[in-house]
Amino acid sequence: MKTVRLTMAQALLRFLDQQYIAVDGQESKFVQGVMGIFGHGNVTGIGEALEREAGELLFIQGKNEQGMVHAAAAYAKQRNRRGIFACTTSIGPGALNMLTAAAAATVNRIPVLLLPGDNFASRQPDPVLQQLECPGDYTVSATDPFKAVSRFWDRIVRPEQLMSSLLQAMRVLTDPAETGAVTIALPQDVQGEAYDYPEHFFDRRVHYIDRRPAGEEALHRGADLLMSRQKPLIIAGGGVHYAGALKELQDFAEAFGIPVAETQAGKSAIPWNHPLSLGGVGTTGTLAANVAAAEADLIIGIGTRLSDFTTASKSAFRNENVAFLNLNVSSFDAIKLEAAAITADAKLTLGALQEEMTKRDYHSGWDMNAISALKEEWDLEVDRLYALRHADGLTQTRALGVINDFVDPEDVIVCAAGSLPGDLHRLWRTERPKTYHMEYGFSCMGYEVSGAFGAALAEPDRSVYAMVGDGSYLMLHSELVTAIQESVKITVLLFDNHGFQCIHNLQRGHGSDGYGNEFRFRSKETGGLTGSYIPIDFAAHARSLGAASYTAATPEELEEALHQAKDEIGPVLVEIKVLPGTNTDGYESWWNVGVPEVSASEKVLEAHRQMRSKLSTARPY
């Protein structure tokens, strides 16, 4: 057996550079490169290997560890999980900064490979700088918390362990049902230790994503259930995109007259103007989708994990005879809501189920005129909100209308947190797939700018817009500099509404007078944060980083700024001054947030009574 002597870090990169993925006979390179921030825990190990032995792997310098993992996850999401970046950091704080983004990737079922530095395996410089010491268990380090947010975790304490670890890591990263964050902790001394690795370990390796067909009995059970129901509603989740089942979804819905609602991850699976498209469903859903969900006697979940926002905290489905049929590659997700489960690939199964139902001469009992009326009513509501004007300034929904009218059908918008996801899920009109990129599994503030950079890396021929609130921007905007450094064009649309207004609205809607969520000066009179708004010039901040920037406070100024931003060569930020509290809400939806049972405020007590009343009508599990 021929061997080659390499350090563990060199072997790691050589292996990653030879990983490919094959879906439906199409092969592509899986690991595109490494995003990293160097410190003493990785600079002389994997850092030196990247400098000398990177092969075809692209190195991208991150500016914040959480931000670069968000960017890597967004890249994988936009590529339908068929391409990834690895992320490397030093030990201690550098590693721990990746935790939040790792959790976001795992929650959203998105593959990212994390390579944090770790304590010396030899323990000679003990404790090394930035080492986390646990007196009760000396094997614990700052990388152990990644176990809770990773689908696979390992620590390499001998260089030869790398081989078995990487094979398991690739198994998880390329498995549609198991994927998420994968963490391989790399002690900084072991990164530089050498071993005689078998040469064949570095051969070109293709990971085949074999589509899993539905079992015959499962398919027949699903068909039997569908035959027994008159008013089925499809809820399309992110799995529809990842499976490439867009045509199959539309064909299935059209064949049997079944309306389609979408989750945040599923949005853009079907064009907004399709006669059967009812838009977003659940807490941030449209009136059309939520009315249909309440009436439906069968919910067909396709590639969705049925989060509380999708189900309106399990209150959306109010037909006393409602049943659930879940089609998902993951059995964990397929059984939710006590559903009849088909654990299989969406593309194959929709086609097979359509064939079976055609044989049975099935057609739904929905009144298509009623569905059209629901859709028309909602379209008029969106038109109203997109045109909504206010004497005091620009409303958020009006700003979204200007943007939606301006962008091209192929342009991609990226968002994650605040009041924008609710408005976008309800109002944003998508015509083409993969143009709506929402991280709402974790709804992680700070994802937006990093995510836009990752999405633009994945699809350089599309224009990418980050939709971000001022609160999210302040939390994490560092990868705007990375976009500038890499000459990757993104347009950041910053909605300045003076604080965390989404949560400000939430607390006021449940009895609070408003507390601690607006960006105000501390008042000398009250002692609280009740003074005037803090004036922040976000456009000037972006310019200081090297981005072009514009400011808009009217619809006309916004449209002009969008035209100017489009003409810019590099990254650009448009600061949009919007009125607080001008987002959407309601539309037959609910969200169980928990309200105090005991309070000095009668408003809070009344909110608690309303919450208990609503909870009594929701499914208990």
Image (tube, rainbow, N blue to C red):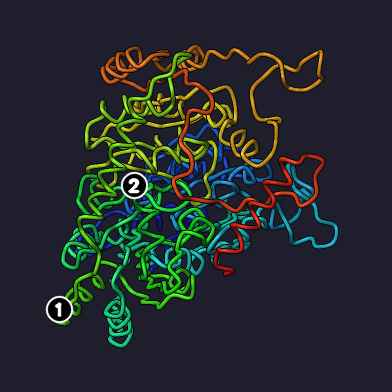
* Residue type pointed to by label 1: Asp
* Residue type pointed to by label 2: Gln
Query: In this figure, which residue is indicated by the disc labeled 2?
Result: 78
Locate the C terminus and report the quarter of the image it occupies: bottom right
Image location of residue 248, percent across then percent down = 20, 63
Nearest the viewer among 170 and 448 is: 448
| 121 sits left or right of 539 in the view | right
**Of discs 2 and 1, which sits in the foreground?**
1
Q: Is residue 453 above or below residue 26?
A: above
Q: CA distance from mark 2 to mark 1?
A: 38 Å
Query: In this figure, which residue is indicated by the disc labeled 1?
Result: 361
**Judging from the image, what secondary structure is the residue with disc 2 in?**
helix
Residue at x 44% of width, y 29% of height = 482
Q: Would residue 2 be seen by someone viewing this image from the given angle?
A: yes
| 537 sits left or right of 280 in the view | right
Q: Would residue 488 be seen by someone viewing this image from the given angle?
A: no
| Mark 2 or mark 1: whose residue is earlier in sequence | 2
Residue at x 28% of width, y 85% of height = 220
Image location of residue 330, percent across then percent down = 42, 70
Res 401 → quadrant: top left
Taking the view exactly as shown, the residue that stands out farthest to the bottom is: 217
**Judging from the image, what secondary structure is the residue with disc 1 in?**
loop
